[in-house]
Amino acid sequence: MSGDVDEADRLARVTLSRAIEPGDLRVTGLVSELGASKVLGYLEAAAEVESHWGFGIAQELGRVDPAQVLEQAAARGIRFIIPGDVEWPTQLGALRDAGALHDRGGEPVGVWVLGSHDLRHLAGNAVAVVGSRAATSYGTEQATELSRDLATMGHTVISGAAFGVDQAAHRGALLAGGPTIAVMPGGVDRPYPAAHAQLLETIAERGLVVSEAPPGAGPTRSRFLARNRITAGLAEGTVVVEGAVRSGAMTTAHWTTNLHRPLLGVPGPVSSVSSTGVNQLIRLGSASAVTNAQDVITDVMTHAARAAGEGANVVDESFVPGPVRSLPRAVPAGASPSVAPRR
């Protein structure tokens, strides 16, 4: 797992991961600038100053035995990956300059991973497919077909394992026999929603379950918000399939835009409340309209080629989507996946 990582840095990051809320920009920003060990020492000193912003965090630091945390996680098949590890997805580093939303932001101090696949490898060719929990039949069908075809074309599908579009996205990738990554709002050992425990078990077998929150942590509103930036940060681009104007999918869209990566939307019926957010993104020019996996790949590959030539932080405002080409179906009509996730 280690590259050129100082193990003292790993232990410091474990301690911070256990003591802070995911995406706490005050800490993530300092860690990126100064290093985890220095920030840990700075926060430990704050335990003596009740008026210090880090006082509450400092109280938690003293309760953490990082070596024990790693040992307990390893016993459950969970590993902690940090910058410098060979498995660390370097694209997460772009979150350092992606701003903040709801006081959340920055490159994570580390991520907890469940599953035997290599995170850097899977995330190196990944597309996020996100959308409404209260998805319509149109939304679930589109997410399933799109994700199945993306997986057939060799792309990892990233989503959040929620009801609705997320569930359909994971299932579509599994139907094609491809890998998928579930990014969780709580610990990777805390299936959420509970009804998706079998789905998450299957994802861990065929892909990965990832979280910025430590093992045992439950989902909270702020952790959902922080999770969405990790989803966008891991992916080459994000596709929104249904999503109201105020929704988690729009938060992921925000992060994708801030990262200067392709934001794509599947147009929905103008009469559908579930599609108001994504239709607005398309109307305002914030997202490209896509109708199939080939559209998605064309946008993502075109952006990657231009970024390689012009610099990764240049916003491409002139791209026109390429022609639609037919794509063979990955699974014959009526076929079932070898493992059927429970609803």
Image (cartoon, grey):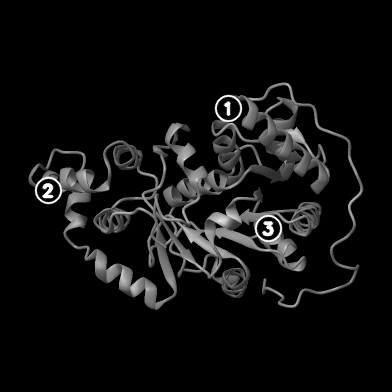
User: Label 1 crowding class (10 Å Cα cut-off): few <14, some 14-19, many 20+?
Assistant: few
Callout 3: SS: loop
Q: Marks 3 and 1, Cα distance to the nearest angstrom?
A: 36 Å
Residue 286 position within the rendered picture, expressed as x and y whole percent measured from the top left:
67, 28
**Quarter the C terminus occupies:** bottom right
Please tell me which residue is depicted at 62% across the width and 54% down the height of the picture: 158
Residue 164 got which mark?
Answer: 3
Q: Nearer the viewer, mark 2 or mark 3?
A: 2
Q: Marks 2 and 3, Cα distance to the nearest angstrom?
A: 44 Å
Amino acid at the residue labelled 1:
Gly
User: Label 3 crowding class (10 Å Cα cut-off): few <14, some 14-19, many 20+?
Assistant: many
Taking depth in this image into account, of 24 and 275 the one nearest to the observer is 24
User: Label 2 crowding class (10 Å Cα cut-off): few <14, some 14-19, many 20+?
Assistant: some
Residue at the left extreme, as displayed? 48
Amino acid at the residue labelled 3:
Gly
Amino acid at the residue labelled 2:
Ala
Residue 47 got which mark?
Answer: 2
Residue 314 position within the rendered picture, expressed as x and y whole percent measured from the top left:
59, 24
**Quarter the N terminus occupies:** bottom left
Residue 31 position within the rendered picture, expressed as x and y whole percent measured from the top left:
30, 42
Residue 195 got which mark?
Answer: none
- Above or below residue 223? Residue 78 is below
Question: Upstream in the sequence, badge 3 or badge 1?
Answer: 3
Q: Marks 2 and 1, Cα distance to the nearest angstrom?
A: 43 Å
Residue under numbered circle 1 = 311
In this rendering, would 330 be left or right of 301? right
